[in-house]
Image (tube, coloured by chain):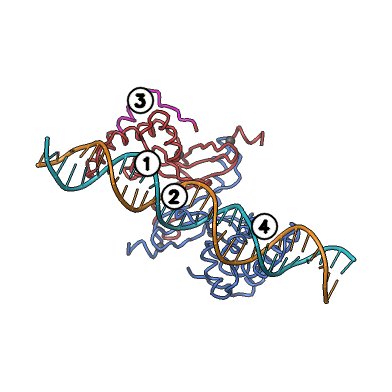
Chain colours: A blue, B red, C orange, D cyan
DNA sequence: AGCCTAATTGAAAATGAATTTCAATTTCCT
DNA sequence: AGGAAATTGAAATTCATTTTCAATTAGGCT
């Protein structure tokens, strides 16, 4: 796994906004701000990727040797509840998290060879999904759409 | 879980065709036809539902007390490989199987209250998915699309 | 600044579905 | 019928996820 640090000042500002949101959430719920939560949230938000708790834990362990896997695991759940992270499970059945507000949305192209994940949003598809739901008098709350196959790099030398 | 037995003679014929396909597959691969595989395939094909190995095993156990869970589990994998079943994992993270040839395809509406699953296929969506893949020079092999929400029955009294 | 209580932490244990192991049994080819 | 190879089913294992629990910490209140 590669954790690409955020670089631009715009990204840094966004991360700090999100960390403020987390603090609000914690205060609101009578929970506490801790050094661990701060570190984990920072590292997670910087990754910008679809990480498992295990992956993020290993990455954090390189810099901090006093933050346990369980706390990383629990903090990711917390970030999810607070609306700063989205939980995803792709075909490998591992639970992953990506920094994404609950109201934002996108779907995924997943390479079956190298595992790379490409994000997309197609408003036409979204609209047609709504129409399908209507057809069945179904009240749609969320949806999941994944396209599996081979990315541009992998499709030739497969 | 309700296992609804197939009723019409057309359905019965279809089931028998599928059981023949299984036999061909077994012979072809140097595998053996057994009473267990026959029973499990029959019961599975009759359900027409999205069953877990556990559910199918419990159902079969009512009639047969000498067929083990492991064999049900393995036979479902086998049916999957032979193209007679499709493996599905929805939001509850349980592996389910449904009788469906590999070339056939549909997507799902899943009720978050009662768990009912409604199937649909929308060719416009399928085409747009292909277009998205093309946009990213991605070679699409399969896709998964699930809409979560509340079914017609559940959306009012929720 | 010190108290106090509730929240947090992290190691270890527990859970539970999925998968593997293995000895006994069965299939089916010759 | 004989025998090699596949199958079966109970039990064991795996592995991600989740829970437990004793020790520690945060932060509101004097
Ligand atoms: Mn994403
Ligand atoms: Mn289906
Ligand atoms: Zn790739
Ligand atoms: Zn429902």
Residue at (24%, 40%) from the top-left corner?
A: B32
Chain of the residue under the numbered disc 3 shown in the image? B
Q: Which marked residue is nearer to the observer: mark 1 or mark 3?
A: 1
Q: Quadrant of residue D20?
A: bottom right
The residue that mark 2 highlights is B143
> Which subunit holds the residue at mark 1?
B
Using the numbered discs, state the Cα–Cα distance from disc 1 to disc 3 in whole angstroms: 23 Å
Query: Could you tell me how far apart the alpha carbons at marks 1 and 2 are, in whole angstroms?
Result: 21 Å
Point out which mark residue B26 bears. Answer: none
Q: Is residue B125 visible in this depiction of the protein?
A: no
Q: Name the residue tied to disc 1.
A: B76
Q: Which residue corresponds to mark 3?
A: B10
Ligand 2 within 8 Å of the CB at mark 2? no
Which residue is more in the foreground, B123 or B12?
A: B12
Circle 2 packing at 10 Å, graded few (<14), some (14-19), many (20+), is some
Q: Are marks 4 and 2 on the same chain?
A: no
Mark 3, secondary structure of its residue:
helix
């Amino acid at each position: 796994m590669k954790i690409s640090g955020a670089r631009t000042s715009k990204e840094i500002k966004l991360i700090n906004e999100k960390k403020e949101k987390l603090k609000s959430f914690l205060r609101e719920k009578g929970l506490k701000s801790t050094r661990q939560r701060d570190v984990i949230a920072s590292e997670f938000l910087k990754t910008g990727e679809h990480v498992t708790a295990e992956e993020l834990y290993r990455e954090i362990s390189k810099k901090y040797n006093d933050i346990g896997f369980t706390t990383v695991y629990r903090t990711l759940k917390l970030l999810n509840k607070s609306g700063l992270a989205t939980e995803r499970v792709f075909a490998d059945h591992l639970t992953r998290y990506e920094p994404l507000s609950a109201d934002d949305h996108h779907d995924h192209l997943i390479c079956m060879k190298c595992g790379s994940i490409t994000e997309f949003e197609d408003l036409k598809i979204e609209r047609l999904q709504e129409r399908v739901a209507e057809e069945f008098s179904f009240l749609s709350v969320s949806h999941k759409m994944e396209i599996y196959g081979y990315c541009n790099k992998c499709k030739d030398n497969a």
